[in-house]
Amino acid sequence: MNEHIPRPTSPQKQDNEAALTTPEALATEHPVRPVLQRVTPDWRRFEVARDRHLDTIAEGIAEALEHRDVINAQTAKCIAHLLSRSLSKDTELAYYAATGYGDYKTLREEYLPLYHHPDAPASARELIDWFGTCHIRRIYPRAASTDYHEPYPLTLDKLLVPTSVTAGEWSGTVHVTGDYDSRTIHGLEAELVNLRVSEDPALQAYLSLANVNAMSGDIMEGFHDAFVATYRDIEAAIDSVCEIDEREREVIDFVNEKGLYFDVLTPNYKVLQEQAEEGHDFVEWGGRVHVFYR
């Protein structure tokens, strides 16, 4: 019952048509604004606007801290206004400040240069963390954290964002932390091409996991540390992970010792899977089940 499909030592071509991909959602259906060309932020204008709205923002953050939640919509709009003041009025941040809506990718390409700017005030980075994590969680309520126990307050470098990528013939959804922009994500796509991800369903399954950071620095090291095996179906995977043969032998020995008799043992796969998922992830992908340590 422990039969599993050995992982090939060399990549093999697989049919990817059944791969499950989740298109990256957009926050709104308004026309997407062209990405703002990089400009030098006017931090003086930001600081003037920050001081003017300090009480409103402080109240919003205090409320979030009290409930261990993201900031409310009004506070997010206020922060977007401050950030837009450092750039220009014709930005997605300014649109968000006025409406409470915005295209995630366009917003990201505007606030991340501010976030990483060497002259950015500490308060700007803190407010971008509050704004960015709020907007991400608004679009992706189940976005995972890089840490086993989610930190609070959340920061962009700890929150994993479902991100659509294309690497050669393969397109799928991976997860990268919220502090990476499109240029870095394009670099990830090139790396995935080099790793021949389109030919490796097990690697695709691994990258689909919500808690796997595709920008961790060494994708293959993380994959090999986590990978258990590939199985033909979920029952075969559970048989192996839960060591059903060993459990059956223990039951048989116990029954024989007590002088009892039984006809057949039937595994309760639902219960066994719940037990196994405490330490393993089961990913149905490409007609097989791939198992990883959590």
Image: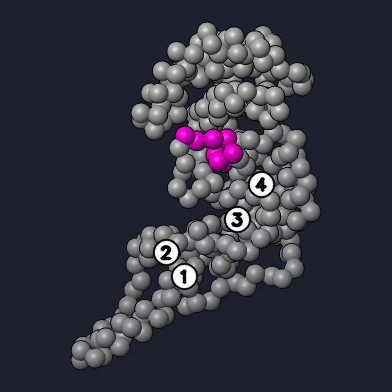
Inspect the image, locate mark 1, and give the three-letter code of the amino acid beneath it: Val
Give the residue number, with chain letter if any, for mark 4.
Answer: 215
Q: Earlier in the sequence, mark 1 or mark 2?
A: 1
Labelled pair 2, 3 in contact (Cβ < 8 Å): no
Give the residue number, with chain letter if any, for mark 3.
Answer: 206
Labelled pair 1, 2 in contact (Cβ < 8 Å): yes
Q: Is residue 117 visible?
A: yes
Q: Label 4's element?
A: loop
Front tag of 4 and 2: 4
Inspect the image, locate mark 4, and give the three-letter code of the amino acid beneath it: Met
Inspect the image, locate mark 3, and give the three-letter code of the amino acid beneath it: Tyr
Q: Label 3's element?
A: helix
Query: What stretch of residues is rendered in magenta?
Result: 153-160
Q: Label 1's element?
A: helix
In the picture, the disc for residue 276 is 2
| Residue located 31% across and 86% down the image | 252
On the image, the x and y values in percent for residue 180 come to 67, 36
Mark 4 is surrounded, within 10 Å at the Cα level, by few (under 14), some (14 to 19) or many (20 or more) other residues, namely some
